[in-house]
């Protein structure tokens, strides 16, 4: 059967409606049409950016260090686990010590995502003190194992205190787990021996790329001739670099821990939603730098509210709707809510220390300060608390009319304020997603037309 290649305009039309991950694969396999693919706007439903992982829709691209052990060497359980699940997420030097060469490197295009803590501690792992600590632990585990195997040369004491508790814990472990701990400490000590005698480690390092989707997982190994942060830069350059237009993204998510996103120069996103953002106040400038001005106002933002400054993101019309999850009880939340102009707000907090009087104050604020029709705030809540709030509002607000689960208050000729609660299950799936905790009820406060 004769086949004709797609013409340029037809190819562009096909690319526009093609899954982005298929586009990436085609560009990789057929470099001759890569330039055409870059011209066509890239549309992504969900984009998640991390330090060594980029996820596009349901497909993740993850980098790590794969250690290929020599045939005569036994790989430890820990090293095998890293190999099986994407590789070691840290660079290694020529002796096998973990190093962090890209920790503070900020190249053109990169975006720093600060946070008050780091999930990966950047500590020295090659000091004499660390080696002594490993040797002490090794002797401890070996003594426990000998005792478990019935050796008369070693005796575990019956003294009290933390050491005794630790001893009893490891005495209760299965033999194979003790042997695993011993193997892992031998692995920790190996770089010290290699450095001491100028030896090579018993493995060869490769950069491993793991591509995982719902239906399959594939890995590929590349020579370890660059650091992980350089490899991540190259990966994101391949995926997103050289595009003439901003990348259109429905939902954008960012790494939880502090990191540097290795992005192409000129990287821009035209986003609709930000999902599950941590440390929003600290990351405000970084987020804004990635977003095309056409993104604003964003359709919605959901974030974990640790600091009152996190709410400042919404002072300048950056979004019409937001969800604050796990609100810190020390935040004067209701004072903040009285100053916001967002159309829709969802509040999800666990075991909050807010009195029902706070809700009454918010109702009174809305009566005194006219809110646009369509404004709606939602709170995850317990049924008994919701019932008390409605009773309080009915008692203290003139003109309030109460039904079973609703209080209605006329606020001007054409509008009324409604305060009501409904079962969580009555919300659609997307609305339920906005609440982090498994509430049974939702209290809604909204302005509607008569």
Image (tube, helix red, strand yellow):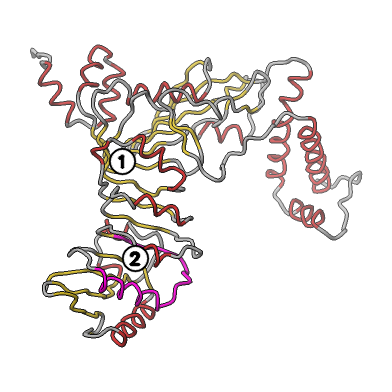
Please give left or right for residue 81 compared with residue 14 in the image. right
Name above or below for residue 43 compared with residue 413: above
Say which quarter of the image contains residue 23: top left
Question: Are there few (<14), some (14-19), or many (20+) residues within 10 Å of tag 2?
Answer: some
Say which quarter of the image contains residue 98: top right
Residue 363: say if magenta: yes
Q: Where does residue 211 sit, x and y in percent of width and height?
A: 39, 30
Q: Which residue is mark 1?
A: 46
Residue at position x 33%, y 61% in the image: 346
Residue at position x 91%, y 44% in the image: 153
Q: Magenta segment, which residues?
A: 345-369
Name above or below for residue 9 compared with residue 115: above
- Check residue 338 in the rendering and tell me which mark sits there, or answer none: 2
Residue at position x 40%, y 25% in the image: 109
Q: Residue furthest right?
A: 153
Comparing labels 2 and 1, the label whose residue is closer to the camera: 2
Helix or strand or loop: what does disc 2 sit on? loop
Report the front residue among 23 and 358: 358
Report the front residue among 214 and 352: 352
- Check residue 418 in the rendering and tell me which mark sits there, or answer none: none
Report the front residue among 112 and 386: 112
The number of numbered discs placed on residues in the rendered structure image is 2
Name above or below for residue 279 compared with residue 361: above
Please give left or right for residue 91 compared with residue 186 in the image. left
What is the spatial separation of the Cα atoms under label 2 and label 1, in whole angstroms?
A: 32 Å
Say which quarter of the image contains residue 53: top left
Q: Where does residue 129 sit, x and y in percent of width and height?
A: 79, 34
Please give left or right for residue 338 compared with residue 282 in the image. left
- Quarter of the figure with the N terminus: top left
Residue at position x 66%, y 23% in the image: 96
Helix or strand or loop: what does disc 1 sit on? strand
Residue 316: say if magenta: no
């Amino acid at each position: 059967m004769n086949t004709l290649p797609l013409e340029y305009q037809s190819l562009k039309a096909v690319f526009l409606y093609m899954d982005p991950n298929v586009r990436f694969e085609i560009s990789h396999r057929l470099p001759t049409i890569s330039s055409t693919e870059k011209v066509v706007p890239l549309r992504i439903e969900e984009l998640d950016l991390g330090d060594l992982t980029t996820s596009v829709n349901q497909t993740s691209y993850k980098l790590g260090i794969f250690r290929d052990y020599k045939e005569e060497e036994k790989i430890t359980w820990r090293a095998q686990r890293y190999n099986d699940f994407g590789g070691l997420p840290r660079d290694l030097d020529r002796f096998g010590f973990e190093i962090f060469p890209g920790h503070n490197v900020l190249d053109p295009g990169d975006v720093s995502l600060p946070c008050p803590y780091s999930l990966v501690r950047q500590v020295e792992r090659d000091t004499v003190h660390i080696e002594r600590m490993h040797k002490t632990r090794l002797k401890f585990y070996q003594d426990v194992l000998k005792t478990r195997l019935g050796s008369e040369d070693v005796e575990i004491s019956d003294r009290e205190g933390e050491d005794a508790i630790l001893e009893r814990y490891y005495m209760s472990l299965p033999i194979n787990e003790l042997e695993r701990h011993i193997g892992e400490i031998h692995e920790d000590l190996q770089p010290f021996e290699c450095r001491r005698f100028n030896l090579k480690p018993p493995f060869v390092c490769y950069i491993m790329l793991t591509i995982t989707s719902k239906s399959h997982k594939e890995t590929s190994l590349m020579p370890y001739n660059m650091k992980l942060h350089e490899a991540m830069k190259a990966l994101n350059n391949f995926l997103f670099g050289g595009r003439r237009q901003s990348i259109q993204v429905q939902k954008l998510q960012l790494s939880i821990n502090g990191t540097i996103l290795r992005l192409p120069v000129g990287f821009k996103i035209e986003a609709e939603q930000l999902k599950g953002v941590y440390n929003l106040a600290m990351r405000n400038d970084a987020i804004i730098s990635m977003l095309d001005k056409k993104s604003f106002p964003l359709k919605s933002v959901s974030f974990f509210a640790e600091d009152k400054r996190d709410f400042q993101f919404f002072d300048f019309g950056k979004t019409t709707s937001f969800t604050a999850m796990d609100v810190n009880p020390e935040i004067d939340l209701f004072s903040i809510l009285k100053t916001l102009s967002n159309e829709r707000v969802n509040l999800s907090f666990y075991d909050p220390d807010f009195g029902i009087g706070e809700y009454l104050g918010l109702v009174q604020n809305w009566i005194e300060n006219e809110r646009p029709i369509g404004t709606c705030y939602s709170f995850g809540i317990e049924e008994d608390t919701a019932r008390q709030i409605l009773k309080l509002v009915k008692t203290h607000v003139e003109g309030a009319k109460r039904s079973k689960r609703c209080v209605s208050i006329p606020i001007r000729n054409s509008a009324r304020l409604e305060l009501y609660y409904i079962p969580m299950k009555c919300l659609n799936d997307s609305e339920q997603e906005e609440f982090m905790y498994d509430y049974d009820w939702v209290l809604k406060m909204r302005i509607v037309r008569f």
